[in-house]
Amino acid sequence: MTDIETGQQNLARVTEKAAADIIKAFLCLPDEKRRWSPDEKARSALDMIAECAVLNGYSAEVISVQAWPVHNYEGFPAAKAEAADLEWDKLKNLRERNTERVAAAIRAVPAEDFVKEIQTPWRPMTLSQIMGHPYWNMTYHLGQINYIASILGCLE
């Protein structure tokens, strides 16, 4: 008998893969270009990594308690800036811890809760939509980091 992966297991697995992929792309950038932005209106790769590290933690809490707000979301810009100022090992550890937390939270959601609606500051969202956000966000930023790498000529 073969094991069939549940939706939660699949989403947790691809979320973990996206987290690994975005770090791999980030580490391909030269150290001196990780805070660099191609335009004053564009974001740096480090800023995107910090966002993913913090939001994975926020998402883990929302998924676990199935309610908003868990954090004072108005404090997110400061939390992201604080994360971006961490030494690389500490930021990497924060991202790893929060990715583990969000993957565990996703795996723990019973299928019958997928349609539960949670009011967010933007609009009502189903729990399954919130569960998919960390994966979507990291793959979105992976593309942006790869774009920066293509500008710099270091895209693998």
Image: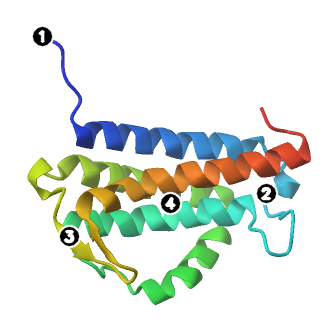
User: Residue 22 at x, y = what percent?
Assistant: 61, 46
* Residue 97 appears in the picture as rendered: no
**Closer to the camera: disc 2 or disc 4?**
2
Q: Residues within 10 Å of mark 1 (few under 14, many from 20)?
A: few
Asked if residue 135 is positioned above or below residue 73 in the image, the reply reads above
State the separation of the CA atoms marked 3 and 1. Answer: 35 Å
Q: Do the numbered discs 4 and 1 sit on residues whose CB atoms are within 8 Å?
A: no
| The label number, if any, that marks residue 105 in the structure image | none
Write down the residue under mark 2: 34
Q: Label 4 neighbourhood size at 10 Å, few (<14), some (14-19), many (20+)?
A: many
Judge from the rendering whether residue 90 lies leftward or rightward of residue 106; answer left or right. Answer: right
Of the two numbered discs 2 and 3 on the same chain, state the one appearing first in sequence: 2
Q: Which mark is residue 94?
A: 4
Does the residue at mark 2 contact the one at mark 4 (Cβ under 8 Å)?
no
Q: Which residue is mark 3?
A: 117
Residue plotted at (51% across, 43% down): 18
Callout 2, which amino acid? Arg
| Mark 2 → mark 1, Cα distance in angstroms | 47 Å
What is the crowding at mark 2: few (fewer than 14 residues within 10 Å), some, or many (at least 20)? Answer: some
Give the crowd class for mark 3: few <14, some 14-19, many >=20 residues within 10 Å.
some
Residue type at mark 1? Met
Q: Disc 1 marks which residue?
A: 1
Q: Is residue 1 above or below residue 5?
A: above
Single out the residue that lies furthest toward the front: 123
Compute the Cα span from label 2 to label 4: 17 Å
Q: Quadrant of the C terminus?
A: top right
